[in-house]
C-alpha cells in the first residue's frame, strides 16, 4: 500500500489505516497495519446472540445473504489481513516489486444514536463516505466499485443502501457494489482489513469479486450488485465499514502507478 505525496484523510480497522497514514506523514518509513478476529468461541457467540443479529438459518446458502430479500442476519467468521503501509518514496528506495494501491482518502463519523444500533437515517454514514471522497479529491463519477459493509441485517442493509444513494447521488445505481465478505463471514475487527486487501488485489487483477447468496435484492435496493466475478479496470475503489454502536468509516483506494 503506497502513500503518495498528493494524498490528503471499527472500531473499523480503516481507523488503523488512518493512524498508519498519520504515522507515515510524521516521517516513519513503514507501518504494519490491519486487524484479525476470532469471534467463534462460546463466549463470543453468546455476546453476538444477545444482539439478535446472528442468522438463524440452518443451511449455509440461506444464512448470510446481504441485501437479499431473504436476509436474516450475518454469519461470523475468523481471520483478517495485515497490510504494509509506506510512503511512495520509501517504496521506490527499496525497489518494491509490487505496490498494490495508494491510500487516497478517508472519512469517519459516528451516529451518536444508540449503543448497539446504527441511526436509521444513515446520514452520518453518508457523511463519512462524502468526506472520504472529498479527502481523495474525487467525485462519485470517479468511483469504479464499492466494497460494501453488507451487514446482512435487513434494516441495516437498508441504511447502507440509503447512505450510498445519498453520497453517490444520481450515479449510485451505476456503480458496481460488492461484498466479498459474504464468502467468509463478518470478521469484526478483521473485516475491513480483509476488504482492503481484497480491494487492492481486485485493482491489481482487474476483477471485482462477487457477493454470494444474493439472488433477489430487497425492495428498493436498486444498486448494481455484483453477484458473479466481473472483469473491470479499477482505478478508484470506495470501501465502507461500520463498527458496533454507530461507528462509520470509508476509505478510498487509488490504483498505484
Image (cartoon, helix red, strand yellow):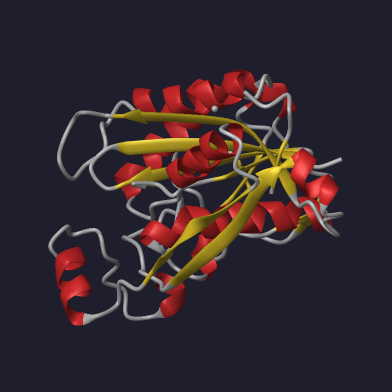
Q: Residue 104: percent from the left, percent from the top?
A: 66, 32
Which quarter of the rendered picture does the C terminus lie within? top right
Tally of numbered tags: 0
Left or right of 118 on screen, residue 196: right
Q: Residue 184: percent from the left, percent from the top?
A: 50, 70
Above or below for 198 versus 219: below
Residue sticking out furthest to the front: 27
Tell me the quarter of the picture where residue 113 sits.
top left
Can residue 220 be seen in the rendering of this structure? no
Residue sitting nearer the eye, 125 or 166: 125
Can residue 121 be seen in the rendering of this structure? yes
Residue at image position (52%, 34%) is 22
Left or right of 119 on screen, residue 233: right
Above or below for 106 versus 192: above
Residue at image position (68%, 59%) is 209
Residue sitting nearer the eye, 144 or 193: 193
Above or below for 19 versus 44: above
Residue at image position (16%, 75%) is 43
Left or right of 197 on screen, residue 54: left
Q: Residue 189: percent from the left, percent from the top?
A: 38, 58
Residue sitting nearer the eye, 252 or 149: 252
Residue at image position (59%, 22%) is 135
Q: Residue 144: percent from the left, percent from the top?
A: 73, 37
Above or below for 63 versus 104: below
Amino acid at each position: 500500500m503506497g502513500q503518495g505525496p498528493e494524498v490528503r484523510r471499527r472500531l473499523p480497522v480503516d481507523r488503523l489505516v488512518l493512524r498508519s497514514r498519520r504515522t507515515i506523514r510524521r516521517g516513519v518509513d513503514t507501518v504494519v497495519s490491519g486487524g484479525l478476529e476470532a469471534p467463534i468461541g462460546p463466549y463470543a457467540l453468546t455476546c453476538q446472540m444477545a444482539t439478535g443479529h446472528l442468522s438463524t438459518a440452518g443451511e449455509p446458502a440461506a444464512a448470510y445473504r446481504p441485501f437479499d430479500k431473504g436476509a436474516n442476519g450475518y454469519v461470523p467468521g475468523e481471520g483478517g489481513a495485515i497490510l504494509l503501509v509506506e510512503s511512495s518514496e520509501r517504496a521506490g528506495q527499496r525497489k518494491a516489486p509490487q505496490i498494490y494501491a495508494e491510500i487516497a482518502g478517508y472519512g469517519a463519523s459516528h451516529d451518536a444514536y444508540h449503543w448497539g444500533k446504527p441511526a436509521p437515517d444513515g446520514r452520518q454514514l453518508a457523511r463519512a463516505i462524502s468526506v472520504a471522497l472529498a479527502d481523495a479529491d474525487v467525485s462519485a463519477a470517479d468511483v469504479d466499485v464499492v466494497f460494501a459493509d453488507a451487514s446482512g441485517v435487513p434494516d441495516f442493509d437498508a441504511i447502507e443502501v440509503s447512505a450510498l444513494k445519498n453520497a453517490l447521488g444520481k450515479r449510485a445505481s451505476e456503480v458496481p457494489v460488492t461484498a466479498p465478505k459474504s464468502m467468509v463471514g463478518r470478521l469484526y475487527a478483521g473485516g475491513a482489513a480483509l476488504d482492503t486487501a481484497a480491494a487492492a488485489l481486485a485493482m491489481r487483477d482487474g476483477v471485482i469479486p462477487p457477493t454470494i447468496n444474493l439472488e433477489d435484492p430487497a425492495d428498493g435496493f436498486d444498486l448494481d450488485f455484483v453477484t458473479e466475478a466481473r472483469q473491470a479496470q479499477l482505478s478508484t475503489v470506495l470501501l465502507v465499514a461500520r463498527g458496533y454502536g454507530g461507528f462509520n468509516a470509508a476509505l478510498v483506494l487509488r490504483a498505484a502507478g
